[in-house]
Image (tube, grey):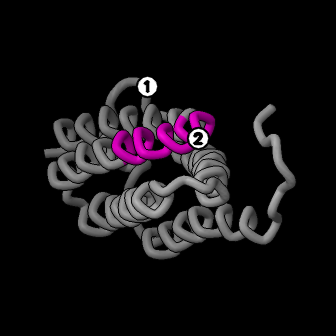
Amino acid sequence: MLISHKIKWKQLIIALAIPLAVGVLSSIFTSSNMELYKNLNSPPLSPPGSVFPVVWTVLYILMGIAAYLVYISDSKETKTALTLYYIQLAANFIWTLIFFNLQSYLFSFIWLIGLLFLIILTMIAFYKINKTSALLLLPYALWVAFAGYLNLGIYILNR
């Protein structure tokens, strides 16, 4: 069973709202540059632009649930784990600006490597508190690794 306790709805809603808000803000700040993706030379396996909002929404929901599970734990390591979580969430938001607004593809690729490192650190911290929470971040880590492939391919193909 994923959750073996009474759900704390207020905390769950807040935990879901935070990453979803980051996603909404990302889309607001980059909406004028989304056409850019369609016009770039992209590497093989590049999904159409319409896939990204769906995937990110699912990933943000999984991230929110993971953060909720850590937040409601009584671990002494909760504060550290959630601090890492919020740092990687901020790094995620900044990557979007670097890639779409600044169109700095090499720098955004380097930033993405740092983001992936932060996600892995967050997963390790979450794992120490709640194994399920770490597993909920696995699709996010895999998607960011795939995004790294796409980002590097775009850099190489659009120099």
* In the depicted structure, whether residue 37 falls above or below residue 94: above
User: Which residue type carries mark 2?
Assistant: Asn
Question: Which amino acid, mark 1?
Answer: Leu
| Quarter assignment of residue 33 | bottom left
Identified at 23% across, 38% down, the residue is 152
At x 65% / y 64%, what residue is drawn? 15
Q: Write the residue at 56% across / 33% down.
A: 135
Which quadrant would the C terminus be assigned to in this image? Answer: top left
Q: Secondary structure at mark 1?
A: loop
Image coords of residue 31 (percent x, y): 49, 69
Q: In the rendered image, is residue 100 in sight?
A: no
Residue 56's place in the image compared with 142, above or below, is below
Residue shown at the point (24%, 67%) measured from the top left:
102
Residue at mark 2: 130
Left or right of 55? Residue 113 is left
Please give the range of residues in magenta. 119-134
- Crowdedness of circle 1 by 10 Å Cα count: few (<14), some, many (20+)? few
Q: Residues within 10 Å of mark 2 (few under 14, many from 20)?
A: many
The CA span between labels 2 and 1 is: 34 Å
Dots 2, 1 in contact, CB < 8 A: no
Is residue 126 located in the magenta-colored stretch of the structure? yes
Name the mark on residue 45: 1
Q: Nearer the viewer, residue 9 or 48?
A: 9
Image location (x, y in percent) of residue 127: 49, 37
The disc, 2 or 1, on the residue closer to the chain's N-terminal end is 1
Asked if 125 appears above or below 14 in the picture, the reply is above
Q: Is residue 55 magenta?
A: no
Quadrant housing the N terminus:
top right
Give the SS element for disc 2: loop
Residue nearest the observer in this picture, 92 or 105: 92
Residue 3 position, x and y percent, is 78, 42
